[in-house]
Image: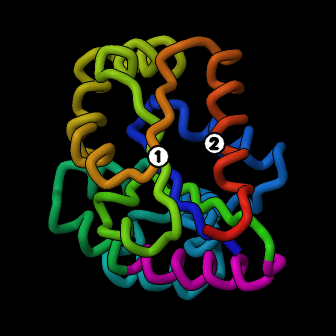
Amino acid sequence: MTQVGLTGGIGSGKSEVSRMLAERGAVVIDADVLAREVVARGTGGLAAVVGEFGESVLTEAGDLDRAALGERVFADPGARARLEAIIHPRVRARAAEIAAAAGSDAIVVHDVPLLVETGQQGAFDVLVVVDVSTDVQIDRLRERRGMSEEEARARIAAQAGRTQRTGVADIVVDNTGSLADLEKRVDELWRSLARPAR
């Protein structure tokens, strides 16, 4: 089994690379999906979040109000750290379960947006970083997510910088070009990941 860590800044196209790897046969474990699962209604994760932040972070239906919680933690590093201390260990445990269920010859891709920020770069056989310039990130966030330039810059600033990410990468996938260019780069990446054990 090859355990691959996949990360990249917001707007870099990491999710697209993850999708393309899944099409080629990778077992993809998406940390964002797991982060929602571990705080779903009825979970111990949700109970812990409510215990830490109060019932104001719940919707009327009893689900986590992600927007309300986001407002509380985005601008408060201490609150964000407390939230991460609840969610991250649960996500890692669930990811380990999924990886253990994959075949022994599987290529398991862990799609982790905050991989570098959470110090997980040593946890994988191969670390892949999807990279674009800050200008490209801003353009994509404005076009695809309707953010203002200020919002985009704030989101980018809240993550690890490009040099932090690329500095720990085993493989950097440049996603500055077209979707067709990215397909070619992912083909090259897949061939390198699928080689017999090094």
50 or 155: nearer the viewer:
155
For disc 2, the neighbor class at 10 Å (few under 14, some 14 to 19, many from 20) is: some
Residue 84 visible? The answer is yes
**SS class, disc 2:** helix
72 or 10: nearer the viewer:
10
Distance in Å between CA atoms under marks 2 and 1: 8 Å
The reply to whether discs 2 and 1 touch (Cβ–Cβ < 8 Å) is yes
Q: Which mark is residue 131?
A: none
Residue hosting label 1: 171
Image x and y of residue 42, in percent: 65, 82
User: What residue lies at 42% left-to-right and 63% top-to-bottom?
Assistant: 57
Quarter of the figure with residue 78: bottom left
Residue 26 lies in the magenta stretch = no
| Amino acid type, label 2 | Leu
| Above or below, 170 relative to 36 | above
Residue hosting label 2: 189
29 sits to left or right of 83: right
| Amino acid type, label 1 | Ile
The residue range painted magenta reads 86-104
| Above or below, 198 relative to 92 | above
Image x and y of residue 107, in percent: 72, 64
Quadrant of the drawing holding the N terminus: bottom right
Residue 99 lies in the magenta stretch = yes
Image x and y of residue 45, in percent: 51, 81
74 or 2: nearer the viewer:
2
